[in-house]
Image: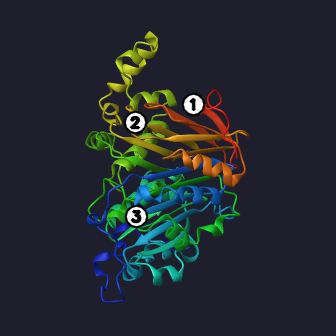
Amino acid sequence: MKPFEDSQTWPSADHVDQEEGPARTDCGSAGIGPGACGLYAAIGKVNLRAAFESAITMQERGTFGAGVLLRGIYPKRPDHYAFHVLYRNRATAKTIEPVFTDEKIGMRHFGEMEPLVTPEAYRKYDLPEMRRYFLSAPSVDYMMRKKHTSVKDEYVRAVVEEYNRRYMGDSRIFSSGKNVGVFLTAMELNETIEAFDLYQYEKKPLTAIMIHMRWPTKIVSSGVWWGAHPISFLNSAIIHNGDLSSSASNRQGLEAADVQRMVGTDSEAILLELDDLVRKRNLDYQQVEWVMCRKFPDELNNIDAAGRDEYQKLVNNPILARYKMSGPSSFVSIIGAKIIAGRDRDGLRQLWMGRSDDQKTVIWGSEEKVIYQSAWIAKKKFKAINCEPGRLVAFELGDDGSITDTFGDTLKQKRESIPI
C-alpha cells in the first residue's frame, strides 16, 4: 500500500484540460419541470422486477431525474466501502481520480477502477463520468492522527465530507456504503435502469430498494446532479417527496449542531437530522417523532404528565427546536439498520405503506397503486394503508433481510389483504 498523503496534495480540478474530449455536463436548475416526486421503497424479501415495474408507473409525476439504491449488491466485498463517484466529465476524472487510485484520500484502494455506466449509455445519453472504487479504512493510528477518531465509519464519513466540499461542482462521492450502491441520472427511470444495467443485480441477495423520480425542489448552485435522490452517505440514505417550508430552520439547526452538509437540499436536512437524533443523540423513535412532527394541543393533552414534560424538554431544546419538519413532505430513510418513514403533520403529501401477509416485505410508495402492482408481480398478498400524518413508522432491518417491528406499524390491525 502506498503511504497516505495529506489532503493538501490532492489534485485540483482547476487544472482540468477542458479541450480534451467533449464535456458531459449536467442539467441546470432552469431545466426542472413541474411535478411531484415518484417515491418507492421496499425492505426485507424484495423483488427487483416488481419494484422497477411498479415505480415506472409513477414516472409522469417526476418528469426527469431518477435514482435507485440497492442494498446487498456487493456480497463478495461486505467489508469494503463501495464509492460511486460522479465527475463532471472525463477530463475532470483524469485529473481527480488519483485521489482514489493513488490513495491520496487516506483509504486503501483495492482492485481497479470500475466504470458504473455502460459504454453504450455514454454514446446514447449526455452523462457525466461515473466510476466505482472499493476502499477500506486505514489503521486506527492513522485515523486518530488525521481525523481524531478510531471508528471506521466516522473516519470514512469525514473523508467523504471533505472530498465533496473540496470538489463541489466538479466531482462528488454520491454513494459510500458497504454492500450498497446508489445509481443516479438526469433521465427517466427506465433509461436509468438501462444506463447502469441494473437488472444485473436481480439475482443478488437484495434486502432494500429505494427509487426516486424527479429533480429535487431545493438544489445547489452546481446543478441538479448534485442533489438527486437517493441522497446517501455510508449506509444511510433518504428519498423525499415534497418541499419543506422549514428548510431555513432545519439548516440553522444543523449548523448549530455542527453537522456538515454535503448537498445542501431540504431532503438532505431530514436525513442528517434523523442521523443526529438516532445515531448521535440516541433518542428512541417516539422522541424522534416528537422532535420532527410536533403535536397539536389536543394531542398533547392526551399524553400523561411525564410524557408532556419530556416532550416539552425536547422541543424547547435550542438546537432540536430547529429540527421541526413542516410543509408538504413524505420520506423513507435508512439510518444504518434502522428504516424510518414519515409523513408531514398536516397530511399534505401521501405515503402509502404495504406489508406482505408473511411479514417478510414492507413497501412504501407515493401512490397506492404501486402496492397493488408489486403484489401482483411478486405473487404475494399485502395489507396497505396511507401512513398517518405527523407519525413515524420504523423497522430494524437485518443483514439477511429479516424485519423486526419497532415503532408505529398499524397494518396488522387495519385493512384486508390485497388480492393478487
Relative to 75, is 258 above or below? above
Percent of width and height locating residue 292? 39, 33
Query: Which comes before the other along the chain, label 2 or label 3?
Result: 3
- Residue beneath disc 1: 407
Contact between marks 1 and 2 (CB within 8 A): the answer is no
Percent position (x, y) of residue 231? 44, 55
| Crowd tier of the residue under label 3, counting other residues whose Cα lies within 10 Å: few below 14, some 14–19, many 20 or above | many
257 to 74, vertically: above or below? above
- Whether residue 189 is visible here, answered yes or no, is yes
Residue 137 quadrant: bottom right
Q: Label 1 is placed on what type of residue?
A: Phe
From the image, state whether disc 3 or disc 1 is nearer to you: 3
Tag 2, which secondary structure? loop
Disc 3 marks which amino acid? Phe
Query: Which quarter of the figure is the N terminus placed in?
Result: bottom right
Q: CA distance from mark 2 to mark 3?
A: 24 Å
Q: CA distance from mark 3 to mark 1?
A: 34 Å
Mark toward the start of the polypeptide (1 vs 2) = 2
Residue 284 shows in this picture: no
Q: CA distance from mark 1 to mark 2?
A: 17 Å
**What's the mark number on residue 344?**
2
Q: Residue at x 52, y 73 (%)?
A: 195
Q: Which residue is mark 3?
A: 64
Q: What amino acid does circle 2 point to?
A: Asp
